[in-house]
């Protein structure tokens, strides 16, 4: 294991010349590593620090004895880096902990009061179901609407120029406006039309419509990009089999486009879910609003932490899922290519 | 009676005049091979016949229907004339059998089981009964092209347009695809095919058309055109083929 380098491999200044060939290029250490990171790490986070200290000392001794080992050198350096990272993490966690404990645990109590959490969480979670429901309904609407927009935008030929222009105008407009503004315009605008159909809509409905209007514009661009990336031979093949333009879109082109945009769609869903809290400006008492109301009642920020937990429970796994899908499809492509 | 007929067809891409007053007839049960240098317009001609490209002048008839007329339902026409492409263009998100089923189901409105039976029969016929559940990327080029042929045959076309269907294949895979075309020819399928495989043209073609100057420059039986053409451009083309050992 402890592969030692004999004299022939050593350069006159005592540095390892066999490093590159032996331990794989840049990773191999040159010269004697500094003792400072292991010592600092030992102070900050002993479990890792001590190991790195021991391996650093071991390596130094082997150098002093004129018998430096590459394995030891690599291990010493890896442990030093590892110890540095562990020390940094420890410091940050300790810093946060100190902040929480500051002023007789005042910060801790302000954010993490278990009693307040127990009392407020059921209401918050109940209201957060609204966020989930609206976001899921909106997401379905967004995908359908975005597909329509994307197809409208990619219609071929001069005759469709007005339609393309209309779609481009829509997409540009709603991507240019702050989402909150659109939500206000639609949320208050639709009921104010006085038209029965709109006036009788619930907050859920107008809110979902507002989200569809805004996010449809973004997601349409994603679909368009995916459709552009599909080779033209696909459409030609579909048409030559007798598919009409829309049939070819529906059965051949769009299924491929949706597949390739799945990770982006998941990411956008996370945004939609987060932005359901914007609907509070319309008077919707969703999760975040409920938490804010509770904060004013109990003069404690714990309900905000509670609603944070609600969001995280949904969004964090989705983020991981997105990464997993990306990695998997990349691996699939590489494997087959 | 001619099944495919082109009359004085003109096709331009911007300033490029690809087809100029082109006349062509393909009778029922004929196998017509289009040959000619790269860029002479063979693919363009096939795409125009199938309505994938519009034409600027002239008329195209399929059967007794003028398909270049603006009032014709091209989708219906395409069901009668199948096309197979150089790069297969299989649908990558579907298995082999789904590729063969999708148009039967969505265009012809057949029942799933009926479509599946037909697809299985056709895939077996092209020797792929073991590969029906594989996705295109898991198939070799020759297998993909055979799926593509089965996919086209599933629409029961009355004629086939084949655009250099073996030129994207490794040499050892060309034979398995040509074998299928050969069989179709013997069954009397009307075919118009662009090809660089002169020996194959000699074997199956009832007529060979040399395309140059945007029209059928010279045509006749394979024996004549490929051995002893009358016109200078055809002779020059053949000479080049002989020099590059492709004839
Ligand atoms: N979509 C297009 N836009 C502009 N020019 C085109 C287009 N398609 C083809 N052309 C031009 O039309 C001419 C004929 O092309 P075509 O593909 O029909 O030739 P081909 O005989 O099939 O050649 P090959 O043997 O290389 O397949 C070429 O000069 C080509 O550059
Ligand atoms: Mg071509």
Image: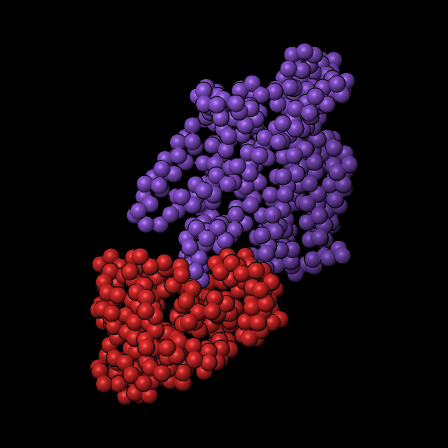
Chain colours: A purple, B red
Of all residues, the one furthest to the front in this rendering is B64
Residue at the (61%, 51%) spot, across then down = A328
User: Which residue is found at the position 43% from the left and 32% from the top?
Assistant: A175
Q: Residue A128's image quarter?
A: top right
Q: Nearer the viewer, residue B90 or A160?
A: A160
Residue A325 position, x and y percent, is 60, 47
B147 relative to A115, above or below: below
Q: Quadrant of the N terminus of chain A?
A: bottom right
* Camera-side residue of A93 and A281: A281
Quadrant of the rendering where the C terminus of chain A is positioned: bottom right
* Image position of B72 (left or right of A197): left
**Left or right, residue A316 beside residue A217:** right
Residue A154: image x %, image y %? Answer: 39, 47
- The residue that appears at 57% across and 60% down in the rendered structure is B111
Q: Residue at x 53, y 64 (%)?
A: B100
Q: Position of residue A138 (x, y in %)?
A: 55, 34
The answer to whether residue A64 of the structure is visible from this angle is no
Say which quarter of the image contains residue B235: bottom left
Q: Which of these two is toward me, A97 or A45?
A: A97
Image coordinates for residue B28, horizontal then vertical, percent: 37, 77
The answer to whether any part of residue A289 appears in the image is yes
Above or below for A76 versus B177: above
Depicted B60 relative to depicted A25: above or below: below
């Amino acid at each position: 294991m402890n592969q030692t380098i004999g004299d022939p491999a050593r350069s006159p200044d005592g540095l390892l010349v066999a490093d590159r060939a032996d331990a794989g290029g840049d990773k191999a250490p040159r010269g004697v590593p500094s003792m400072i990171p292991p010592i600092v790490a030992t102070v900050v986070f002993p479990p890792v620090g001590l190991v790195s200290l021991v391996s650093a000392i071991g390596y130094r001794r082997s150098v002093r004895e004129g018998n430096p080992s590459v394995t030891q050198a690599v291990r010493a350096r890896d442990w030093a880096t590892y110890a540095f990272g562990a020390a940094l993490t420890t410091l940050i966690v300790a810093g946060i902990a100190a902040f929480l404990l500051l002023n007789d645990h005042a910060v801790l109590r302000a954010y993490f009061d278990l009693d307040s959490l127990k009392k407020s969480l059921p209401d918050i979670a109940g209201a957060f179901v609204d966020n989930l429901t609206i976001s899921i309904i909106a997401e379905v609407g967004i995908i359908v609407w975005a597909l329509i927009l994307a197809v409208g935008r990619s219609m071929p030929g001069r005759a469709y120029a007005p339609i393309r222009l209309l779609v481009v105008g829509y997409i540009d407009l709603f991507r240019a406006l702050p989402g909150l503004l659109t939500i206000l315009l639609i949320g208050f605008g639709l009921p104010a039309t006085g038209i029965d159909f709109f006036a009788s809509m619930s907050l859920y409905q107008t809110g979902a419509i507002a989200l569809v209007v805004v996010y449809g514009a973004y997601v349409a661009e994603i679909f368009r990009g995916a459709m552009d990336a599909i080779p033209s031979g696909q459409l030609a093949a579909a048409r030559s089999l007798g598919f009409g333009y829309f049939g070819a879109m529906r059965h051949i082109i769009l299924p491929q486009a949706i597949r390739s945009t799945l990770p982006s769609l998941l990411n956008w869903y996370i945004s939609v879910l987060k932005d359901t809290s914007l609907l509070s400006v319309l008077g919707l008492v969703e999760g975040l609003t409920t938490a804010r109301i509770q904060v004013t009642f109990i003069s404690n920020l714990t309900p905000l932490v509670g609603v944070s937990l609600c969001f995280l429970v949904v969004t964090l796994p989705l983020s991981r899922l997105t990464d997993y899908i990306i990695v998997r499809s990349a691996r699939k492509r590489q494997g087959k290519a | 009676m001619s099944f495919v007929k082109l009359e004085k067809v003109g096709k331009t891409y911007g300033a490029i005049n690809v087809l100029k007053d082109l006349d062509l007839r393909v009778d029922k049960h004929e196998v017509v091979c289009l040959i000619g240098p790269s860029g002479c317009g063979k693919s363009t001609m096939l795409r125009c016949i199938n309505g994938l490209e519009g034409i600027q002048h002239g008329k195209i008839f399929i059967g007794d229907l003028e398909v270049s007329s603006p009032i014709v339902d091209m989708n219906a026409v395409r069901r009668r004339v199948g096309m197979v492409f150089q790069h297969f263009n299989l649908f990558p998100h579907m298995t082999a059998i789904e590729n063969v089923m999708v148009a039967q189901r969505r265009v012809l409105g057949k029942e799933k089981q009926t479509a599946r039976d037909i697809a299985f029969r056709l895939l077996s016929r092209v020797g792929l009964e073991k590969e029906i559940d594989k996705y295109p990327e898991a198939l070799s080029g020759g297998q993909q092209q055979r799926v593509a042929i089965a996919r086209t045959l599933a629409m029961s076309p009355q004629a086939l347009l084949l655009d250099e269907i073996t030129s994207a294949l490794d040499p050892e895979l060309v034979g398995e695809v040509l074998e299928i075309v050969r069989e179709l020819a013997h069954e009397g399928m009307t075919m118009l095919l662009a090809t660089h495989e002169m020996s194959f043209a000699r074997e199956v073609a009832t007529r060979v058309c040399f395309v140059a100057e945007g029209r059928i420059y010279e045509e006749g039986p394979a024996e004549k055109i490929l051995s002893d053409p009358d016109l200078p451009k055809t002779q020059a083309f053949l000479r080049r083929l002989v020099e590059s050992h492709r004839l």
